[in-house]
Amino acid sequence: MTSPADPTHEVRSHPASPTPTPTPARRISGAVWAALGIVYVVWGSTYLGIRVVVETMPPFLSAGLRFVVAGLLLVGLIAWRQGPSALRVTRAQLGSAALVGLLLLLGGNGLVVLAETSVPSGLAALLVAVVPAWVVVLKAFYGHRPTAGGLAGVLLGLAGLAVLTLPGLSGDVRIGGVALVIVGTLLWSVGSFSSSRIPMPANPFTASAYEMLAGGLGCAAVGLIRGEQHGLDLAAISTRSWTALAYLIVFGSLIAFTAYAWLLQTAPLSLVATYAYVNPIVAVALGSLILGEALTWPIMLGGAIVVAGVCLIVTTERRG
């Protein structure tokens, strides 16, 4: 769970031309492919990074530190590159950004971080991949009739989700961890859906900075309420966990997001949205290769079904 964007929602609009003329297909530049590769690999690897962080760090306090530091760094970058005026928002916009940040990063990402203390990173990524299906369901409640392909994608996603819960039902992993991820995907979907319907800051980088600060402070508050600070020994935190946290801050929350925001302005949305079904594949591969996570038949079958469903949704639900 790394991006607040909804891959089924068209974020750009173009004025209609009174005399439409065919235009040649836009050539995809090397820079676009490079940025897309960053989003594929880095966002796919964040699940592995989270799993390594929680080996020796408390979940919510580590997530809070990640997002607060990343948010402050992004605020500094915005002020440096665009000027302090780029950070100015109305009270309503600030409140909306804070709400979305809490839904995405405290409710969505925070629960995934907590779940990864007992759920393999690859399984968590596959469970998270069902988010586009929840977004289609939310849109349907607000009168947006899904396409046939979108509806088929939702049904496939839910079927895959059922298969993916089998490791928890069989006792191979804790069912509570699986449930946490599913609740997190629902909260992430509500945050993604709401972000396009409430008064958000016009600058996506400014919006993301405030979302990260609000979500990070929310994670830190929950961590303190849970008592994660009690018995916390900084000397006992491994270098491996500190390195993974630094990776999540710099690469996961800053570089990959910047690449994604740039892609939204320069590349076809249908191409950018492919991250939604590439990320879980990357996460499963990295979890297996680096952490030795088992590739059981429910994970492989359920993951394939979920990815197929997401592919259908992304390719058929382009407008929100």
Image: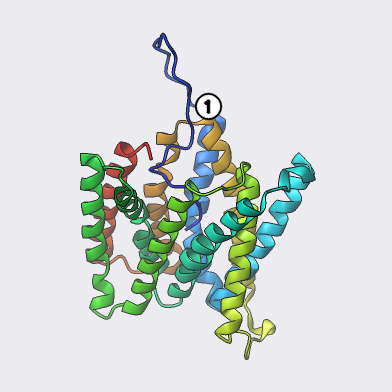
Colour theme: rainbow
Image x and y of residue 158, in percent: 24, 58
299 is higher (above) or lower (below) than 200: below
Image x and y of residue 132, in percent: 35, 51
Local crowd size for mark 1, using a 10 Å CA cut-off: few (<14), some (14–19), many (≥20): few
In depth, the one of 163 and 82 nearer the eye is 82
Residue 246 shows up from this direction = no
266 is higher (above) or lower (below) than 83: above
Element at label 1: loop
29 is higher (above) or lower (below) than 73: above
Residue at the disc numbered 1: 29
In depth, the one of 103 and 18 nearer the eye is 18
Which quadrant: the C terminus? top left
Q: Residue at x 23, y 41 (%)?
A: 149
Determine which quarter of the picture holds residue 289: bottom left
Q: Residue at x 44, y 35 (%)?
A: 269
* Residue 111 as seen in the image, left or right of residue 136: right
In depth, the one of 73 and 251 nearer the eye is 73
Residue 43 shows up from this direction = yes
Q: Residue at x 52, y 36 (%)?
A: 264
Q: Amino acid at mark 1?
A: Ser
* Residue 273 as seen in the image, left or right of residue 229: left
* Residue 215 as seen in the image, left or right of residue 152: right
